[in-house]
Amino acid sequence: MRLPVLPFVLLLCVASAARAEAPNLSPNQVGEAGAAARLILAQRSYEVALSNGDPVVLISAIRMAREVTLRAPAAWTKTTEGDPDAGAPEGRTAAPDPAGPEAIAIAQGLAGEDPDLQDLVYDLDAQLPHGRRPTAINAPASLDPGQTDSWTLVLAGEATAEIGLIGDGDTNLGLTIADESGALVCARPAAKAPALCRFTPARNGFFTVKVRNPGPVRNSYRLVGN
């Protein structure tokens, strides 16, 4: 049966509009956890270890973080919305780093007189990971109270994307990701805990990652990706 021309054209227009408004997301499942997810897990484990005074969890967090090679973003661009607040409390100048020397010092203190734990900590510091390691993009930045950073980046179609947010813990930070049409792809409510978005774009495209600081204190954060 032949459809009338006008209704058929209208049907095509409606289908095209629906496709244009749909988020750039693939129906395929996301793949295995990558380098950015590993960093977020290491950060969460690090914070749990410090909260509980657990040297074993801390050693595991340090090992995970040190197995990832960090590199600066080559094609990420950032704009900031909101006026700077010269009178805002400074807070910490950087997010805690499980791969840094301070984490090793804390682990040494928690190990105490336990020889087995001391050996594990020594191995962390004496035997840095060798060979090929997973690589993650690491972009440090800071936000005054009420400000929002918008990061623009390109993601590949049918390739699992990971975008993680690690704040310094002084205030909550919110994370949202939208595609080139403005359709929401991922959202994480404002919180102090590290946040992670994992998804698979259906096609190559531009994405906007927004980091928002609703708190009263300047927050130094790290945006990580694969």
Image (cartoon, rainbow, N blue to C red):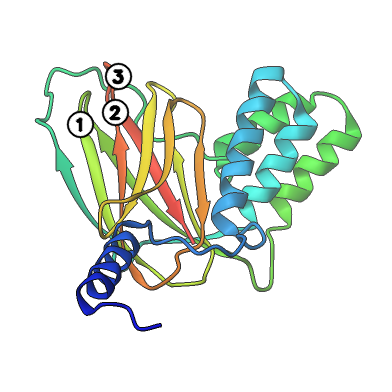
Q: Residue 224 location in percent, x, y?
A: 44, 51
Could you tell me which secondary element the residue under label 1 belongs to? loop
Q: CA distance from mark 2 to mark 1?
A: 6 Å
Q: Amino acid at mark 2?
A: Asn
Q: Which mark is residue 223?
A: none
Location of mark 3 (residue): 215
Q: Residue at x 60, y 65 (%)?
A: 134
Location of mark 1 (residue): 147
Residue 220 sits in which quadrant?
top left
Residue 56 sits in which quadrant?
top right
Q: Residue at x 39, y 61 (%)?
A: 24
Residues tagged 3 and 1 counted as in contact (Cβ below 8 A): no
Could you tell me which secondary element the residue under label 3 belongs to? loop
Q: Amino acid at mark 1?
A: Gln
Location of mark 2 (residue): 213
Q: CA distance from mark 3 to mark 1?
A: 9 Å
Q: Amino acid at mark 3?
A: Gly
Residues tagged 3 and 2 counted as in contact (Cβ below 8 A): yes
Instruction: Please tell me how crowded label 1 is: few (under 14), some (14-19), or many (20+) other residues with Cα within 10 Å.
Output: some
Q: Residue 124 location in percent, x, y?
A: 73, 48
Q: Residue 61 location in percent, x, y?
A: 68, 41
Q: Is residue 98 above or below residue 37?
A: above
In this rendering, position of residue 98 left or right of residue 167: right
Residues tagged 2 and 1 counted as in contact (Cβ below 8 A): yes
